[in-house]
Amino acid sequence: MIRYTPDLDGITAERLQGGFFVGWPNPPSPEMHLRILQNAYRVVLAVDDAAENQPVIGFINAISDGVLTAFIPLLEVLPAYQGQGIGTELTRRMLEALQPLYAVDLLCDESLIPFYQRLGLIPVTGAARRNYAMQSGCPITNAVLTDLGDHE
């Protein structure tokens, strides 16, 4: 059974193992992932209560000024659980939690825009900067960055 919760009580790095950040050349460690969640304005977790150790199998987080705007930086569902509506439910719950705010923004690949449109978001123009040397949340060396390739 999948349980959705905004509560981080009892969530440890061990419960965040399993393959989040697919395709990231330098993903955050489970410990850094936990820090990301702990420092978010809001989180919603999907937990598999039927599995051993009740792992977190999906999450969404938001950062916000708590007054007017919020930004959703991450939505992740473990590959083995994708295609079951978990990402949709996580996003729906987060948007409900952020309902009182004027603006809720996120950036995504163009191929994901239809997913978010189905949930009531509209495409807008945006811009971003990526510092791939800090993708994991910790600085990496120039040699490692060179191995990751040119991402600009």
Image (cartoon, rainbow, N blue to C red):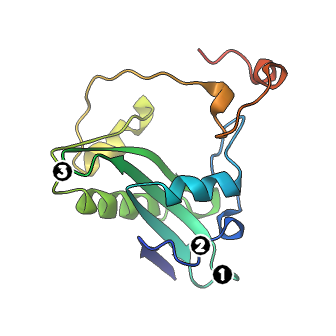
Determine the residue positioned at 43% across, 23% down.
128
Query: Which of the two discs, 1 and 3, labels the residue nearer the N terminus?
Result: 1
Tell me the CA gap for discs 2 and 1.
15 Å
Q: Nearer the viewer, residue 48 or 60?
A: 60
Q: Which residue is mark 2?
A: 11
Determine the residue positioned at 71% across, 62% down.
17
Crowding around mark 2 (Cα neighbors within 10 Å: few <14, some 14 to 19, many 20+) is some
Location of residue 138 in the rendering, given as x and y in whole percent from the top left corner: 69, 38
Query: Which of the two discs, 3 and 2, labels the residue nearer the N terminus?
Result: 2
Instruction: Answer yes or no: is residue 78 visible.
Output: no
Location of residue 4 in the rendering, given as x and y in whole percent from the top left corner: 43, 74
Secondary structure under tag 2 reads loop
Q: Quadrant of residue 93?
A: bottom left
Determine the residue positioned at 41% across, 30% down.
110
- Amino acid type indicated by mark 1: Ala
Location of residue 151 in the rendering, given as x and y in whole percent from the top left corner: 63, 18
Q: Which residue is mark 1?
A: 51
Tell me the CA gap for discs 1 and 3.
36 Å
Q: Nearer the viewer, residue 58 or 8?
A: 8
> Horizontal placement of 140 versus 76: left or right?
right
Q: Which residue is mark 3?
A: 101
| Residues at marks 3 and 2 touching, judged by CB atoms closer than 8 Å | no
> Horizontal placement of 143 versus 69: left or right?
right
Crowding around mark 1 (Cα neighbors within 10 Å: few <14, some 14 to 19, many 20+) is few
Q: Nearer the viewer, residue 139 or 104?
A: 139
Tell me the CA gap for discs 3 and 2.
27 Å
